[in-house]
Amino acid sequence: MPIGASIIITLALVFYSVGVWSERIAGRLKPWHLGFFYLGLACDTVGTGMMFSFAKGMTFDVHGITGVLAIVLMLVHAVWATVVLVRRDENWITRFHTFSIVVWVVWLVPYCSPIFFAMADLPG
C-alpha cells in the first residue's frame, strides 16, 4: 500500500476521532465537531481512492466491504449532523454522540483489519 494513502487514512482517523470524542466529552454537537467529521470523511475518501488505484479496484473482502460501508456511514453521519445543527434540534444536539460513537467503531474495522490480517500471517 502506498505510504501517501496510509498517511491520509491516518489523518482521517485523527480528524474523525477528534470530532467524535470531543462531541462525546462536550455532551452536545457543535459546529466545529461537524468540521472534523467532514475533514475525516474527506481524508478517508481520498485515501480510499488512492488505495483503490493501487489495488486496481475494490477488494471484496472484509476490509473492502467494511471500508465502503464506513465511508457511506461517515457521509450519512456528517449530513445528519448538518441537519441537526441547521434545525437547532436540542434533543438531537445533546444525543447525537450516541450515533457518532457507533459510526466511529464501524469505521475502525476497515482501519484496523489490515493490522489483524497481517498479524494472522505471522509465524508462530
Image (cartoon, rainbow, N blue to C red):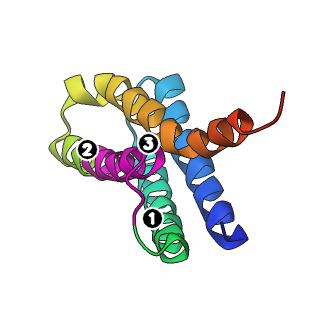
Residue type at mark 3 is Val
Q: Which residues are magenta?
A: 58-78
- Residue mark closest to the camera, 1 vs 3: 3
Rounded to the nearest angstrom, the CA distance separating label 3 from label 2 is 34 Å
Residue at 49%, 55% in the rendered image? 40
**Mark 2: secondary structure:** helix
Numbered label attached to residue 42 = 1
Residue type at mark 2 is Leu
- Total numbered labels: 3
Label 2 vs 1, first from the N-terminus: 1
Quick one: label 3, few (<14), some, or many (20+) residues within 10 Å? few
Quarter of the image where the N terminus is located = bottom right
Which residue has dot 2 on it? 85
Q: Is residue 61 magenta?
A: yes
Q: Position of residue 111 (x, y in %)?
A: 56, 45
Residue at 62%, 68% in the rendered image? 5
Q: Position of residue 112 (x, y in %)?
A: 60, 39
Front residue of 30 and 116: 116
Front residue of 11 and 80: 11
Rendered view: 40 above or below 96: below
Residue 42 quadrant: bottom left
Front residue of 70 and 35: 70
The overriding secondary structure of the stretch rendered in magenta is: helix
Residue type at mark 1 is Ala
76 sits to left or right of 4: left
Which residue has dot 3 on it? 62
**Mark 3: secondary structure:** helix
Residue at 59%, 58% in the rendered image? 9
Q: Position of residue 64 (x, y in %)?
A: 42, 52
Q: Is residue 66 magenta?
A: yes
Quick one: label 1, few (<14), some, or many (20+) residues within 10 Å? many
Rounded to the nearest angstrom, the CA distance separating label 2 from label 1 is 20 Å
